Image (cartoon, rainbow, N blue to C red):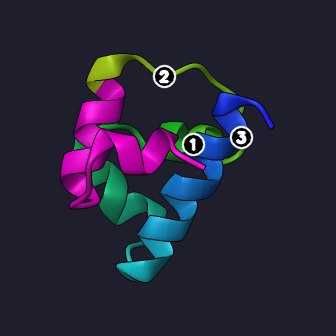
Amino acid sequence: MTILITIAKNVKKRRLELKFSQEYLAEQADLHPNFISLIERAKCNLSVVTLYKLSKALKCNIADLIGE
């Protein structure tokens, strides 16, 4: 499994655990809602800054997003 697929699955799983919509997560992470969709479909590369924003919005560590 590629790292992008792993991140996609972990972001979506955590978002659903928190009962966040993609729009709400985007707002909390200061990202565009379409970008959240691309992330969850493993259709884009992410910067460290984006991973940091996502981890803060999802109340987890970056390691939780990149680990299998």
Q: Which residue is mark 1?
A: 7
Neighbor class of circle 3 (other Cα within 10 Å; few <14, some 14-19, many 20+) is: some
Q: Position of residue 37 (x, y in %)?
A: 59, 47
Left or right: residue 14 compared with residue 57: right
Q: What residue is drawn where x is 50% and y is 45%? A: 36
Circle nearer the viewer, 2 or 3 = 3
**Corner quadrant of residue 14:** bottom left
Q: Residue at 33% x, 19% y: name it.
A: 48
Image: magenta residue range = 50-68
Tell me the quadrant of the picture where the N terminus can be found.
Answer: top right
Q: Is residue 55 magenta?
A: yes
Mainly helix, strand or loop, the magenta region? helix
Q: Residue at x 40, y 60 (%)?
A: 23
Image coordinates for residue 38, horizontal then vertical, percent: 63, 38
Where, by quadrant of the figure, is residue 4 drawn? top right
- Element type where label 3 sits in the image: helix
Residue, disc 3: 5
Sequence-wise, which precedes: disc 2 or disc 3?
A: 3
Q: Is residue 17 above or below residue 25?
A: below
SS category of the residue bearing label 1:
helix
Camera-side residue: 60 or 18?
A: 60
Mark 2, secondary structure of its residue: loop
Is 19 located above or below residue 23 in the figure? below
Q: Amino acid at mark 2?
A: Leu
CB under 8 Å between discs 1 and 3 = yes
Q: Position of residue 18 (x, y in %)?
A: 35, 79
Three-letter amino acid code of the residue under disc 1:
Ile
Q: Residue 12 location in percent, x, y?
A: 55, 61
**C-beta proximity under 8 Å, tags 2 and 3:** no
Which disc is residue 46 wearing?
A: 2
Determine whether, in the image, residue 13 is placed left or right of residue 17: right
- Which amino acid does the dot numbered 3 rest on? Ile
